[in-house]
Amino acid sequence: MSDGLYVAMSGAVAQERAMDVTANNVANGNTLGFRAERVTFAEVLGDQGNLSFVSAEEAAVDTSKGELRTTGNPLDVAVDGDGWFAMETPDGPRYTRSGAFRIGPGGELMDERGNGVLDVGNKPMLIPADAKDVTVDPAGQVLADGVPLGQIQIVSLNDGKLRNEGGNLYSAPGGVKPVENASVVSGHLEQANFDPVRGMVDLIRISRNHESLHQMMTTYREIDQRVVREIGGA
């Protein structure tokens, strides 16, 4: 079997990985606080060192910021600068840039999925049942009718080790640490940092590359079969 077939196959596999990541980016183009992932390619030497293959590296999270959209809702908040909101989920602590918060039936301050917002003491934020006016100040302090209840936990993450856990939730295998003097903007929500239109263009390009590599594989197979027939008929 020709070396070219293996090279083309490695390229096709890498393009499939890029297609999966880009398709997920496009699907989350309207997800609040979503961070797109980027795939890079690397050259890998074969066992004999005389042939190079293509490999898709592990997708990296793009931590560039998304645009802020004004909502006017006092419980919609966005981090001004670096930092992530800490959330309590069934799978343990997770982190998000989406501050679309609401008050749950039990008084919990939660996100759109029902995950609890953690305070700086690593406990869920609770709102009194009789509270009429709940707001968040620029420091992330939650107030009910002007009375401070606690401060939303905002942390910095090791950007090089972020892991997407679905949608706009992330885990941080590299560890977290509190953000000093964190600042939030009330009445705003951060959008995804990915343009779906650009993503569709990328998908078309990747699909064409993938198709070209499959055509190359077909050509190499035909060449191999022709050589076998010619040698066998000699």
Image (cartoon, grey):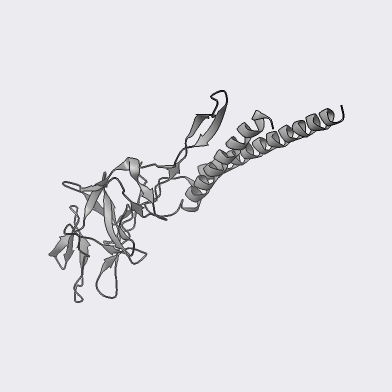
Determine whether, in the image, residue 150 is placed left or right of residue 63.
left
Which quarter of the image is occupied by the C terminus? top right
- Residue at far top of view: 50
- Residue at far left of view: 147
Which quarter of the image is occupied by the N terminus? top right
Q: Nearer the viewer, residue 1 or 23?
A: 1
On screen, 66 above or below 110? Answer: above
- State the count of labels: 0
- Residue at far right of view: 233
* Residue 231 image offset from top left, x and y in percent: 82, 28
Give me the residue at 83% from left, 32% from top: 229
On screen, 111 above or below 225? Answer: below
Q: Nearer the viewer, residue 135 or 169?
A: 169
Quadrant of the image occupied by residue 168: bottom left
Q: Nearer the viewer, residue 193 or 160?
A: 160
Can the viewer see residue 75 in this picture? Answer: yes
Determine whether, in the image, residue 84 is placed left or right of residue 163.
left
Give me the residue at 40% from left, 45% from top: 193
* Residue 122 image offset from top left, x and y in percent: 20, 60
* Residue 37 image offset from top left, x and y in percent: 43, 44
Quadrant of the image occupied by residue 218: top right
Can the viewer see residue 201 in this picture? Answer: no
On screen, 65 above or below 2? Answer: below
* Residue 47 image offset from top left, x and y in percent: 54, 29
Give me the residue at 47% from left, 39% from top: 39
Q: Nearer the viewer, residue 27 or 157?
A: 157
